[in-house]
Amino acid sequence: MEENQSKSYNAFFTILNKASNFIAGFIAVALLVVVVTQIIGRWIGSPSPWTEEMTRYLFIWMIFIGIGLGFRKAESPRVTVFLNMMPPSIQKIGKWVYTIGSISFLLFIVIYGINLVYQQIALNETSSVLLIPVWLVGISVPVSGVLGILNIIQSLIYHKNLI
């Protein structure tokens, strides 16, 4: 039974990691294409206003996806030097303070991100140039929180020595 659970965890986290890596890579490539388009447009004297707005939205997605991905191998900034100087009992407590604090913060992001998206949908907000629904950008906030929580769980399962 435990082996089946391990295989299902592996399959779930493999799919999650591949999907989040694909999204991050897609955002990076899209950002490159949009910025190069913006540079060429300015160079030839015909800048496109949509490129500035799209660049901003892609940066927002990239930042929030990066927040969620940073927890995959417990790579988020932590005060490990100070913690490593403490006795082992304090170090164990520090691991749980880090874990509980991070999950609490990410839950906060999920809850308020969902509220933000509901507000954007209710007000039917659209971007000024692209005229896309702004919730498509706002949804990056709760997505990042959920991704971060899942990656903390992954770190607890597979990288016990890092947390």
Image (cartoon, rainbow, N blue to C red):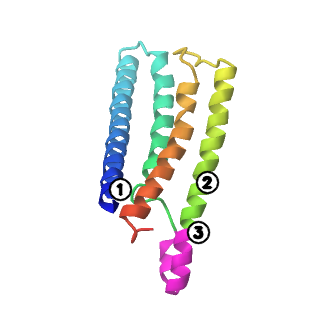
Residue 76 in the image, given as x and y percentages of width and height: 47, 59
Say what amino acid the circle numbered 3 marks. Answer: Val
Up the image or down, 48 lies above or below 103; here it is above
Residue 65 in the image, given as x and y percentages of width and height: 46, 42
Tag 2 secondary structure: helix
In the rendered structure, are the residues bearing label 3 and label 2 in contact, judged by CB atoms less than 8 Å apart? no
Residue 10 in view here: yes
Between marks 3 and 2, how big is the CA–CA gap? Answer: 12 Å
Say what amino acid the circle numbered 1 marks. Answer: Gln
* Residue plotted at (52% across, 87% down): 87
Up the image or down, 95 lies above or below 141; here it is below
Q: Is residue 2 magenta?
A: no
Q: Is residue 90 magenta?
A: yes
Q: Nearer the viewer, mark 1 or mark 3?
A: 1
**Lower position in the chain sequence, tag 3 or tag 2:** 3
Tag 3 secondary structure: helix
**Mark 2 Cα within 10 Å, few/some/many (few <14, many 20+)?**
some
**Mark 1 Cα within 10 Å, few/some/many (few <14, many 20+)?**
few
Farthest bottom residue? Answer: 87
Q: Can you identify the residue that label 1 sits on?
A: 5
In the rendered structure, are the residues bearing label 1 and label 3 in contact, judged by CB atoms less than 8 Å apart? no
Q: Nearer the viewer, mark 2 or mark 1?
A: 1
* Residue plotted at (49% across, 17% down): 49
Q: Can you identify the residue that label 3 sits on?
A: 97
Name which quarter of the figure residue 42 lies in.
Answer: top left
**Lower position in the chain sequence, tag 1 or tag 3:** 1
Q: Can you identify the residue that label 2 sits on?
A: 105
Residue 4 in the image, given as x and y percentages of width and height: 31, 55
